[in-house]
Image (spheres, rainbow, N blue to C red):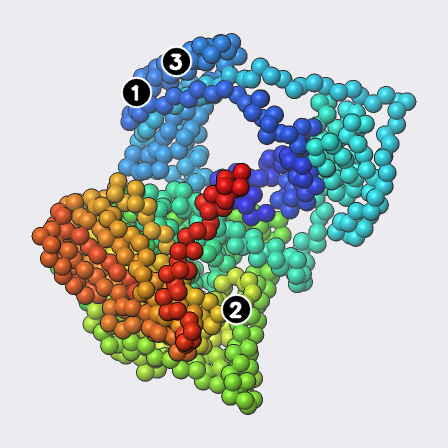
């Protein structure tokens, strides 16, 4: 029932306080089961359930809405003016409905104020039955506290908009009452049929709805047949016919042995989905409340849930490079300030030595306390979002030429952004302005966006905290933590089975039994830095050692990768190679030992520049790991990071798709984000509206994928015209070393970054640089393709992908719609 939870809890409503309304021909067959799964007590089924949509059109209220901007502070001086505007709009809306011949006395007017704290961007629409300013303020403060977990008591409240909603009720009525059963007409069933429920087949009476009267009670199990729908009353449920002939079903919740910690496979699946649902709902709240393009539009964020030991329990399918690293971030905070954490505290961190991936990725961590144990957190909820600017050398905080961490933006090691429910805005601003003290560096260029998005992350975590506490209230802390461990155990078993299958596969290939094997792979960054990997699989104990000895030393520039990046790459690859559905969690890493040479590219000094390691080296790590297993050819091998901006609060960041590597039985996808990234590209309309650029071209780059029995995916061709003087920075790789093919497949094409000046000159920018863009200049980004897999047979046409591409675009919903129209 995750979709229903998303529509209720995901929008701030407690589903248990509501009635489950059911309609449609088959809806009544599943209503009791769904209500029980959701913890709801009542199901309501209209006597018109089978034709409810058509009936709704006839019964719908007629609404006239009006809205106007205000911008005034809500206080005693301005309230009379605000109230006058509300009354004026109310009268105008009412008059409009009267013109449509609705009775003025029957018209209801709802009054709304769209309120926000001064200096913030998140406005909340509030309504009140009274005409007092205090009532609107109280409602706003309550909603703000519920959504964000804190309030700003000394901050003025601004009225962004004034809105009214005038409603006229439909003249049509269906409130026809039915008769009550007389004593000489006993309730009779039509027949009995065998119906299957959880306890097996049960003799189930069948009733016709036209033979039922008001106040009739029907105990489950039972089936009620209506001309337009069928209703199943499950065992331990009671159906009652209302005065109007509708059916109200009371759901009796069977109290399971919720305190049992013994493993039950059905309950294991339930908890797995509940944990995942919590992370997903955190993500929805974050997207809803954030204001930056990077988080709201590009979805460059991740949300996850962690156990009392800081181990990853479940994550939403967000950004893989974040998820393995976030566990390290939570566990660092437990070691650093775990004893000082109290209910109402929220931690902000981004430092690479504290589990950070790179500085723009700000991680907000909220401990979950429960009444059963107030002394220490029982779970943690965390969200990591990429902020488009946090200061540093260049706009976008992704400088291609940084040589130390201090040049890459604001640093947070263990900062309590909320302490005992108080948001520490002053201290936060000071920290975000600190990079301006470094030579040639700037403080954050998007301060208000930083603050607003951090509040959104806090709000997302608060949603997760409430859902975790609710889950504990239902099942008890002991049971929830037991199933958390079972889910992690399940992931551990899946990884062990994967290692056994790999060992068996290589043993068959060598035609001899082996208890241990070693897999090797090497790849190179464009500067020549080497990533070496030896995977030593111990079949006897179902364990593996990932040894990166031989990897190059820490580099001068910024594609060093913190330890957490390697952990993320390993956990992602293991999860990707497991054939069945399991959550990505801490259990995946239990059979794995990781060796990272100190001072190397993958284990640099704490002050090393790392902003590129998260977006370049992480992708190359995945290629190396998958190469060692022989899983697939290389993908584009970087995230094609582009930033531009100025020092006037304009800053934009994007990662651009490329080609995916082909595998043993599949072609690589074209124009997609691969492996460690999963972001969305900004819509052209939003890009051009918010930033002084024109998107001239965005299409696939034909034939850039490697040939083979299975072809690598094509990269993309993206061209952006600048309308204002800006600084453009790029961090890209695979501009020198090709994405390799496997098993005879050909390499994919390298990427290329070009600058076309307004006078027509074309300049190759290389993989990493910052350049001033003048009005009329165009940036041309050609991203790498993926490698091919397997040799091309002589009889196969190497250009066959052009035909495939042409047929590919003739699919999907638009193509289906066209076929439907032609068929008609």
Residue at the spot of label 2: 578
Label 3: state its secondary structure: helix
**Residue depicted at x 58% and y 39%:** 15
Sequence-first disc among 3 and 1:
1
Mark 1–mark 2 Cα distance, whole angstroms, equals 63 Å
Residue at the spot of label 3: 92
Residue 7 vs residue 291: left or right? right
Coordinates of residue 779 in the picture (x, y in percent): 19, 55
Tell me where residue 714 sits by quadrant: bottom left
Mark 3–mark 2 Cα distance, whole angstroms, equals 63 Å
**Residue depicted at x 53% and y 21%:** 61
Mark 3–mark 1 Cα distance, whole angstroms, equals 22 Å
* Near-viewer residue (164 or 802): 802
Work out whether residue 693 can be spotted: yes
Label 2: state its secondary structure: loop
**Front disc: 3 or 2:** 2
Tell me if residue 24 comes above or below residue 363 in the rendering.
Answer: above
Residue at the spot of label 1: 78
The answer to whether the residues at label 1 and label 2 have Cβ atoms under 8 Å apart is no
* Near-viewer residue (655 or 782): 782
**Residue depicted at x 67% and y 19%:** 175
The residue lying furthest to the left in this view is 759
The answer to whether the residues at label 3 and label 1 have Cβ atoms under 8 Å apart is no
Tell me if residue 588 comes above or below residue 86 in the rendering.
Answer: below
* Near-viewer residue (470 or 528): 528
Coordinates of residue 469 in the picture (x, y in percent): 54, 49
**Residue depicted at x 29% and y 34%:** 118
The residue lying furthest to the bottom in this view is 512
**Front disc: 1 or 2:** 2
Query: Is disc 2 surrounded by few (<14), some (14 to 19) or many (20+) residues within 10 Å?
Result: some
The answer to whether the residues at label 3 and label 2 have Cβ atoms under 8 Å apart is no
């Amino acid at each position: 029932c995750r979709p229903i939870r998303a529509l209720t809890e995901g929008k701030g409503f407690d589903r248990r306080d509501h009635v489950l309304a059911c309609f449609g021909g088959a809806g009544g067959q599943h209503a009791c089961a769904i209500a029980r799964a959701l913890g709801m007590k009542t199901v309501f089924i209209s006597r018109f359930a089978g034709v409810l949509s058509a009936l709704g059109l006839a019964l719908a209220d007629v609404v006239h809405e009006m809205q106007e901007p205000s911008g005034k502070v809500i206080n005693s001086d301005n309230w009379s003016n605000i109230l006058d505007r509300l009354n004026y709009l109310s009268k105008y809306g009412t008059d409009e409905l009267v013109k449509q011949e609705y009775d003025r006395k029957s018209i209801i007017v709802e009054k709304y104020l769209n309120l926000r704290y001064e200096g913030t961007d998140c406005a909340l629409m509030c309504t009140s039955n009274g005409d007092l300013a205090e009532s609107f303020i109280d409602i706003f403060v309550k909603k703000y506290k519920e959504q964000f977990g804190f309030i700003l008591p000394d901050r003025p409240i601004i009225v962004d908009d004034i809105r009214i909603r005038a409603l006229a009720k439909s003249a049509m009525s269906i409130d026809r009452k039915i008769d009550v059963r007389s004593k000489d007409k006993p309730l009779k069933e039509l027949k009995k049929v065998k119906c299957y429920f959880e306890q097996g087949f049960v003799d189930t009476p069948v009733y016709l709805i036209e033979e039922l009267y008001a106040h009739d009670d029907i105990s489950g199990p039972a089936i009620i047949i209506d001309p337009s729908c069928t209703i199943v009353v499950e065992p331990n449920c009671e159906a009652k016919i209302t005065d109007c002939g509708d059916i109200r079903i009371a759901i009796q919740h069977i109290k399971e042995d919720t305190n049992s910690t013994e493993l039950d496979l059905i309950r294991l699946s339930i908890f797995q989905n509940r944990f995942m649902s919590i992370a997903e709902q955190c993500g929805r709240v974050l997207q809803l409340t954030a204001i930056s393009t990077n988080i709201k539009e590009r979805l460059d964020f991740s949300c996850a849930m962690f156990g009392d030991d800081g181990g990853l329990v479940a994550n939403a399918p967000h950004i893989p490079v974040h998820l393995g690293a976030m566990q390290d971030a939570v566990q660092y905070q437990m070691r650093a300030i775990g004893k000082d954490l109290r209910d109402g505290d929220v931690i902000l961190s981004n430092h690479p030595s504290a589990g950070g991936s790179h500085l723009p990725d700000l991680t907000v961590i909220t401990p979950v306390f429960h009444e059963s144990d107030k002394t220490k957190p029982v779970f943690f909820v965390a969200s990591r979002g990429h902020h488009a600017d946090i200061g540093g050398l260049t706009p976008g905080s992704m400088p291609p030429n940084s040589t130390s961490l201090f040049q890459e933006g604001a640093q947070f090691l263990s900062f309590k952004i909320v302490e005992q429910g108080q948001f520490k805005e002053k201290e936060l601003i000071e920290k975000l302005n600190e990079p301006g003290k470094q030579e040639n560096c700037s403080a954050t260029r998007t301060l208000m966006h930083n603050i607003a998005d951090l509040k959104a992350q806090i709000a997302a975590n608060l949603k997760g905290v409430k859902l975790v506490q609710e889950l504990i209230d239902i099942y008890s802390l002991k049971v929830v933590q037991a199933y958390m461990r079972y889910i992690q155990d399940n992931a551990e078993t899946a990884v062990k089975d994967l290692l056994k299958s790999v060992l068996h596969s290589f043993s068959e290939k060598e035609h001899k039994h082996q208890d241990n094997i070693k897999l090797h792979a090497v790849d190179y960054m464009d500067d020549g830095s080497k990533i070496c990997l030896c995977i030593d699989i111990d079949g006897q104990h179902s364990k593996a050692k990932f040894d990166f000895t031989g990897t190059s030393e820490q580099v001068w520039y910024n594609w060093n990768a913190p330890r957490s990046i390697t952990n993320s790459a390993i956990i992602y690859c293991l999860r990707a190679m497991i054939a069945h559905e399991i959550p990505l969690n801490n259990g995946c890493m239990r059979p794995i030992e990781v060796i990272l040479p100190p001072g190397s590219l993958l284990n640099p000094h704490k002050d090393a520049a790392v902003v590129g390691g998260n977006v370049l080296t992480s992708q190359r790590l995945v290629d190396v790991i998958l190469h060692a297993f022989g899983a697939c050819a290389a993908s584009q091998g970087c995230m094609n990071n582009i930033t531009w901006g100025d020092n006037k609060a304009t800053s934009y960041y994007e990662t651009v798709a490329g080609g995916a590597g082909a595998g043993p039985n599949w072609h690589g996808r074209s124009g997609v984000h691969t492996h460690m990234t999963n972001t969305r590209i900004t819509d052209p309309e939003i890009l051009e509206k918010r930033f002084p650029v024109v998107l001239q071209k965005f299409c696939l780059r034909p034939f850039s994928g490697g040939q083979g029995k299975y072809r690598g995916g094509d990269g993309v061709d993206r061209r952006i015209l600048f309308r204002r003087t800006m600084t453009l920075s790029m961090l890209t790789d695979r501009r020198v070393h090709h994405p390799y093919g496997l098993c005879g497949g050909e390499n994919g094409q390298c990427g290329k970054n070009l600058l076309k000046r307004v006078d027509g000159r074309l300049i190759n920018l290389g993989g990493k640089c910052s350049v001033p863009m003048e009005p009329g200049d165009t940036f041309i980004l050609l991203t790498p393709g993926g490698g091919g897999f397997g040799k091309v047979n002589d009889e196969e046409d190497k250009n066959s992908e052009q035909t495939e591409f042409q047929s590919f675009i003739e699919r999907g919903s638009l193509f289906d719609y066209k076929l439907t129209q032609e068929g008609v």
